[in-house]
Amino acid sequence: MEKEILPQPDNTAVRTALWRALHVQTDAEPHILEDEIGLQLIAPEEHWQERPDMKYTKRLRASIVARSRFIEDLIIRESERGTKQYIILGAGLDTFVQRRTVIASQLQIFEIDQPDTLAWKQKRLSETGFGIPENLHFVPVDFEISSWWDELMKAGFKNHEPAVIVCTGVTLYLTKEAILTTLQQISMIAPGSKVAMSFYLPIELLEKEDRPMQEMAEKGARESGTPFVSFFSPSEVLSLAQEAGLKRAEIISTEIIKHLYFSDRTDDLEPASGEIFLVASV
């Protein structure tokens, strides 16, 4: 009898969820984001905090928690303005629904990701007692053979109503052409929608202390069969947004993120310099 092969979450999704938990356990208060739910879902082996990808990546951890907080602030702000749909492209082990239950209950939320990651997440949400509310829609997509846009429509998304669509940690693995196509699809959502997408700077634009870690990350990605594909300068990102037909495009730099979330900290926690955000309107 063949042993059943159970779905497993993406390694990057697991790592970012553990970084969010490690922030709560390790860094000084006030915490930028309080999120240990991903840790509960993963239930890693004892002493997981000592793993090299946890122990020696403080600046990356800071970037991840700031990224999550920035996105959370955006969706809360837009929901207060009346937006009722929230799309997370590359959702991984996002826990907004489980943590911000009051706000989340007012939205139709569509989490898009690889089938194995979403199947594992659904299973763990049930096993840990969180459950799956009716307004949370999992949209499994094999990005190599099917369209996330088509699958989103099948899941009940209302294209004539505004939405917030976010995409973080994904563009590294996509070609420029694929990113442009994605932005053009987003531009077809109803006017009043907002998009926030993260991009990554080429190594020569990073602060010097971040370059060795970036070189290690690129090497690891190549060896694992998921090489980094795309890096962009801020001006190139704005050109992509313009070509896609998006409006009021702006870049949220690491310096802006530092000002928003790190200016009054008593410890030396600071984000790495590699990630920037495109924020634009439809």
Image: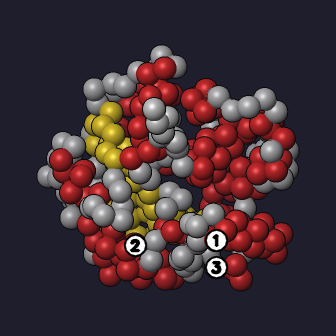
As drawn, is 103 to the left or to the right of 62? left
Q: Residues within 10 Å of mark 1 (few under 14, many from 20)?
A: few
Looking at the image, which residue is at 19% across and 51% down? 153
As drawn, is 61 to the left or to the right of 115? right
266 and 189: which is toward the camera: 189
Spatial CA span between label 2 and label 1: 20 Å
| 2 or 3: tag closer to the N-terminus | 2
Spatial CA span between label 2 and label 3: 16 Å
- Give the quadrant of the C terminus: bottom left
Q: Residues within 10 Å of mark 2 (few under 14, many from 20)?
A: some
Could you tell me how many numbered marks the image carries? 3
> With respect to residue 43, does 164 lie above or below?
below
Which amino acid does the dot numbered 2 rest on? Ile
Question: Residue 60: x, y in percent?
Answer: 72, 55
Looking at the image, which residue is at 52% across and 43% down? 9
Q: Is residue 67 visible?
A: yes
Check the image and name the residue furthest to the top: 129
Question: Residue 105: x, y in percent?
Answer: 34, 27
Mark 2: which secondary structure? Answer: helix
Mark 1: which secondary structure? Answer: helix
Q: Is residue 94 visible?
A: no
As drawn, is 145 to the left or to the right of 5? left
Numbered circle sitting on residue 179:
2
> With respect to residue 43, does 70 lie above or below?
below
Which amino acid does the dot numbered 3 rest on? Pro
Spatial CA span between label 1 and label 3: 16 Å
Numbered circle sitting on residue 202:
3
